[in-house]
Image: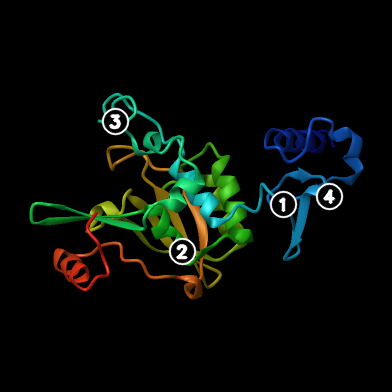
Amino acid sequence: MKSEFIQLLQKVRKSIEKGYICKNWHSYKDDLTETATGYFVHPDDCIYEDGDFYHKDLDTKSVKQTIYEMLIENTGTHFLDSGGDNGRQWQRNQGKTLQDFENQAPETITKKGDYYERSVSVFHYLNSFGLEIDKTSRIFNDLNENANNWDADCDAYGVSVEAWNYLECFYNVKVLRTFNTYNGDSDLSQIIQGAWLQIDGEQYFLCQIHGGCDARGGYTNARLFKYNECLSEFMSEYKSQDEIAQEIEEGFLMVN
C-alpha cells in the first residue's frame, strides 16, 4: 500500500513538472483523469480519442511541431568536434520559429562553376513523407523523451530501454531496415538516421535528425511516426547533375 502511494505521488509530481496539472491540484483531485501517456490531467484539459484520454495540447503535437522540436533540440557539444562556439546545426537553428521553417524553400539550387549544388530542406522533406502520430507514436515519443537509459536491445539508435520495452510488451514489433543518409547520396540540409519498423503489421518510421558537426554523433532522440502512404508527397532526397540540369532546362527548377 505504501509503495502504491509513493508511485501515485511520483506520478502527480511528474504531471506537475510536465505542465499537465497545476500545483493546486488538490482542489480538483477527485476529478483527475489519467492520460494514455501516463499523466494526470483535469477533464477540461483533455480529449477522448480511440478509447483513451490525452492532454489537448501536450499530447497532440502535430507532425510539423514534432519535427520542428527535433530541429532545435540540443544535441550537445564536444571540445573535439569542429563546431566551435555556435557552428553546430542545432545551434544555428536556435531562434527560428516553426513559421521560419515552413517559409523555407523546399529545395534550392546554386551553381558553383559547372557544378549544381542542391539543398533540400529536411523539414519539408520529412513533412512530405506521409507521417502521422497515433497512440503508439505518442506513448513511445513521451517515454523516449523522458528516459535516461539508452541501452535498448534493438538495432535502431536513439531508443531508450523504456520506449523499446513498451513496444515489445504491447505489440509485435520488427525492425525492417536501418539507414543513415550520410552513407549515401543525399541533398538533405541535415543528416537523418533511423529505421523502418513493422508494428502489428503496420509500417512505422523511426527518425533522428543530426544536429551536431561530426556525423558519428550529435543526433536527436528518436521519434516514432506511423507511415501513411496515401498522405505521402514524393520529394526526391537526391538528384544527379544531369537530372538537375534537365529540370532547369524544362523550367521545373531555378538557380538561386
Would you call the spot at circle 1 few (<14 residues within 10 Å), some (14-19), or many (20 or more)?
A: some
Q: Which residue is mark 2?
A: 197
Q: Give the alpha-carbon distance from disc 4 to disc 2, as whole Å.
A: 34 Å
Quadrant containing the N terminus is top right
Q: Element type at marker 1?
A: loop
Question: Which residue is at the front of the view, 172 or 248?
Answer: 248
Callout 2: helix, strand or loop?
strand
Q: Secondary structure at mark 4?
A: helix
Q: Position of residue 198 (x, y in %)?
A: 48, 67
- Identify the residue at image location x=72%, y=66%: 50
Which residue is denoted by mark 3 in the rendering?
A: 83
Q: Disc 1 vs disc 2: which is toward the camera?
A: 1
On the question of residue 99 being in view, the answer is: yes
- From mark 4 to mark 3, how far is it between C-alphas? 46 Å
Tell which circle, 3 or 2, labels the residue nearer the N-terminal end.
3
Of mark 4 and mark 3, the one earlier in the sequence is 4
Disc 4 and disc 1: Cα gap in Å?
10 Å
Pick the quarter of the image with the C terminus: bottom left
**Residue 56 tag number:** 1
Q: Is residue 19 left or right of residue 28?
A: left
Tell me which numbered mark, 4 or 1, is placed earlier along the sequence. 4
Question: In the visual, does 98 lie left or right of 215?
Answer: right
Residue 43 got which mark? Answer: 4
Find the distance from the CA under tag 3 to the CA under tag 2. 33 Å
